[in-house]
Image: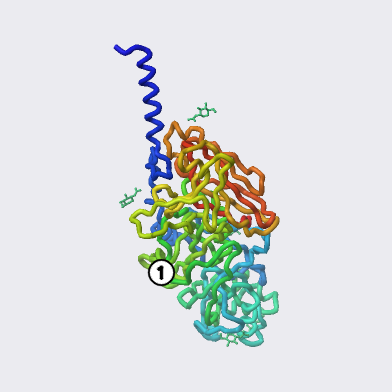
Amino acid sequence: MFSPTRLLVFAGLAVSLAECAIVAPAYQGVPATTSDAADFNGTTTDASSIASTAQQVDQKSGAASDAPPDLPVAATTVTALDGTLVNASVSSTTRRGLTNVPSHLTRRNNSNYELVFWGTGTGPNDRDASIEGTAYLTYTLVSNDTYNIDDCLAKCDSVDGCVFANLYYEYNNPGLDALFSNLKCALYGDVHDASEKTNFGGQQLYPAPGGLDYIQQSSGWAAKSLVDPATPAGYDLVFGPTGGANNAPGYMGFAFLDKYDVNACATLCNQRGADGVGGACQYFNIWRAVVNGNPTTYTCSMYYIVADESSAVNFGQGDLVVTESRGYKRQNVVVDGGFEGYTCTPPGQEVPFCFTEGYANWQGTSPAGGNFDASIFNYQPYAHSGSAVALLGSAFGTDQLPGTLAPTQSLSTQAGASYTLQFFHSSFYSGQQSEANASMKVIWNGQTVATLNPGFAQWTPHQFTVTAQGNDKLQFTGGSAPAYIFIDDVSLFPLLE
Ligand SMILES: *[C@@H]1O[C@H](CO)[C@@H](O)[C@H](O)[C@H]1NC(C)=O
Ligand SMILES: *[C@@H]1O[C@H](CO)[C@@H](O)[C@H](O)[C@H]1NC(C)=O
Ligand SMILES: *[C@@H]1O[C@H](CO)[C@@H](O)[C@H](O)[C@H]1NC(C)=O
Ligand SMILES: *[C@@H]1O[C@H](CO)[C@@H](O)[C@H](O)[C@H]1NC(C)=O
Ligand SMILES: *[C@@H]1O[C@H](CO)[C@@H](O)[C@H](O)[C@H]1NC(C)=O
């Protein structure tokens, strides 16, 4: 039988054994609790939901018989969101120069149009039809002294995003007969063809026995070539245009737009709520769906992982063809926010392992008496993404002082502008018990933005809004070995909404 004294000795041994089990990161310790492998299975683009919604949505329209001419072009509308049909305009503020000026498919330059289809004649029994197609913008009346193609194309030139005009006479419409002309020039932000001549009139606009309205000489004119839309503020073009939509992980959902409007898609990405695992929207893919040869909708897919052309391999399915696909990634003010600029020399180890207190892009500092209290590791098992990561807390486990990690250069921001600061943290290295007091601070220009006391935690994204004063200083401070904190994938996104 053990005496109480011997029991105490055993208890003490158990505690010290538990602590000894934590091998400090500098000795390439294996985390006491491993990270839940980031599971991006099931986060890939839901192409079938996009395709089936594209079969339901109806974005085709034209100049209504009772609409007055020269209405302003309506703001871009979301027609479906994550598989549900909706009707909501995209609210985009004009802060810092991001205007709601649509950046559709844009024509190369003025009056470079080509005939797509001629209309049928002028005889008393000739009948024709006007276009019902996507991205209808507005219509104007041009003088009907002649079949006035020039004035119609000049009007298209003057309307932002116009790449197609449908010119036609509409008869038996009292609204037009009260005006100077019945020659309608309907403008579109996408190119259409004769297969979309589906509006034959046929409405009783004059009281009976007045005839039904009808259409004659409906011709179509398209911009000869399209140019890249202007890149939205806060984004960089990654690829495009191609015929492939992204099929990529980190998918957050999709919206259909009534026009090919990259600014509207950027706004949706900016405003998309952060994913609990993946964080903020960092990338979008906009493309045109052509179904049975006709433009049908404009898809805006959003992602929390930046994709590129290598995964833009969805060329369509069934009668749906992907066209005009472009990818844009959100600009990140932080240089090397994933620490991947720190690599091991000599390279070529099977799993590289090295660490440092600082390198070109980031510097760790320890308070007096501390040793490696903030450091950067290149060791894939510790990283959130890629193979490098930063550590707060003595890398050798030799003191309990908090370290400070900061970019070596001040951040190149615009004074007065707001930014979203995002980073991922984990505090699982030493296990549930030893990480219980894990804590850290986020410091922006010397001011504490947030104090986090996560205790034991898997990789978690965090977002904060900060205001820049220009050349800003960002610091992360904390960790107290063995309550280690890892930090990875630090981003600072211009906050445009
Ligand atoms: C993801 O799916 C692949 C193939 O189905 C599987 O091998 C892999 O283990 C999965 N990953 C996770 C983290 O579940
Ligand atoms: C969408 O809403 C606007 C404004 O309420 C309305 O004018 C328009 O007809 C609606 N469109 C559809 C397709 O329901
Ligand atoms: C329009 O584009 C054509 C060919 O791309 C070019 O030759 C012409 O100079 C351009 N005109 C203007 C006004 O920019
Ligand atoms: C021209 O437009 C006016 C007004 O709508 C209409 O009365 C007239 O018949 C039109 N002329 C032709 C040739 O269509
Ligand atoms: C956590 O902090 C409390 C209060 O300072 C302390 O009593 C406790 O021992 C700490 N736990 C660990 C695992 O360090």
Q: Position of residue 150 (x, y in %)?
A: 63, 85
Q: Position of residue 414 (x, y in %)?
A: 67, 59
User: Left or right: where does residue 319 sit relative to residue 300?
Assistant: left
Q: Is residue 312 visible?
A: yes
In the rendered image, which residue does mark 1 sit on? 321
Q: Nearer the viewer, residue 484 or 3?
A: 3
- Quick one: which residue is furthest to the left in this view? 1
At horizontal 57% and vertical 57% (from top left) the residue drawn is: 334
At horizontal 46% and vertical 39% (from top left) the residue drawn is: 397
At horizontal 52% and vertical 64% (from top left) the residue drawn is: 328
Q: Position of residue 268 (x, y in %)?
A: 56, 57
User: Left or right: where does residue 410 sit relative to residue 273?
Assistant: right
Q: Nearer the viewer, residue 204 or 46?
A: 46
User: Left or right: where does residue 209 sit relative to residue 83?
Assistant: right
Q: Position of residue 52 (x, y in %)?
A: 41, 59
Q: Is residue 219 visible?
A: no
Q: Is mark 1 within 8 Å of ligand 2?
A: no
